[in-house]
Amino acid sequence: MTSIAEGVWVVELPLPHRGVVETTNCYLLADDAGGVHLVDPGWDTPDNHARLEAGLTDAGFALDDVRSVTATHLHPDHLGLGSRLRSERGVPVALHRLEHEALTRPLYPEPDETIARWGIPADFVDEVRANVLPRSQPPGLAADVVLEDGDLLPLPGRAVRVVHTPGHTVGSICLHDESAALLMTGDHVLPIVNPGLGLGGFLPDDDPLGLALDSYARMAAYDDAEVLPGHGVRFHGVATRATQIADRHRRRGAEIAALVDADPGASVWQIASRVNWTGGWEALVGFLRLSALSQTEMHLRHLARRGTLGK
Ligand SMILES: [Zn+2]
Ligand SMILES: [Zn+2]
């Protein structure tokens, strides 16, 4: 547990598997009525439950003092323990409306439909199918508090406002603590890793990249705030970091647009296999290949929607 500001702490909660990030930052926010509120309570494991309880104790609270959980988005490394605190202790969970609605759908569409649409060669169908299986959420999970852009969290004595930043998922939010000048960014803006886009809740006609570019541009209004990311270290300069991430997506988009110009009839699979991925296409297997294919499709969709990339 580390103190960040008056009445604000962070507890780092490990992910159960090794990946590009290893811990989730769970933020603790004290209200002025003796309660404490959690943002992104981390992956639901017994160890993390114990770590969270120890962090609360260090900050002067008990589990009984937890008055609400807000998740920046529905991924299990963020919403995670919120589902357990809700079912075991009746703690209300707050999510953006679109994230709440997405909980009732599979995170990914039907595998066979995706395989056909992407033009996957027969040799690779099994591999893709193994990684495209819909990942369901805990049954019965729902938001008790449904948030919209501009709402204040139900947090007495502290003005924490919701900033809807779709892109990573459809209902991803940042949370702006106006009095303490802090911006909790979930997976929208991270200090080192470039967050993936289109990873939950979007409908087939949505344009996650277009929405994300607009969401990155919104960060300019919060440049004075200290950034409290969902993973990694705190930092200042959210506008610069958001622009870096947006530019990287635009460069990849320009590359894909050129590949489409060169071969307008190519399938998603063919285009993806020609992209200059870090480490090379051949090295992308399993989930990584799936992720490259869905990123490619996202760029193609954006291209079709807006006529050009980067607008
Ligand atoms: Zn995420
Ligand atoms: Zn995350």
Image (cartoon, rainbow, N blue to C red):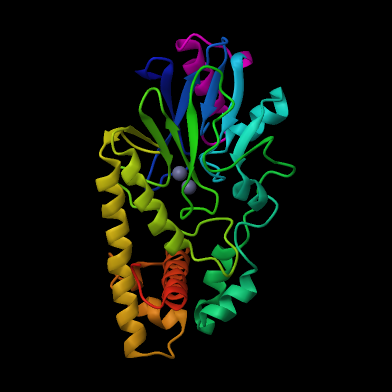
x and y percentages locating residue 270 in the rendered image: 41, 83
Up the image or down, 6 lies above or below 90; here it is: above
Q: Is residue 133 rendered to the left or right of residue 222? A: right
Image quarter of residue 9: top left
Q: Is residue 84 magenta?
A: no
Picture coordinates of residue 245, whole percent (x, y):
30, 54
The image shows residue 249, relative to residue 7, as above or below, that is below
Residue 152, image quadrant: top right
Q: Residue at x 52, y 83 (%)?
A: 119
Q: Is residue 57 above or below residue 252?
A: above
Q: For this rendering, which residue is in front, 239 or 102?
A: 239
Query: What segment is highlighted magenta in the picture?
Result: 42-64
Residue 82: image x %, image y %? 61, 32
- Residue 5, by quadrant, is top left
Residue 48 part of the magenta segment: yes
Where in the figure is residue 251, as x and y percent of width and height? Answer: 27, 67
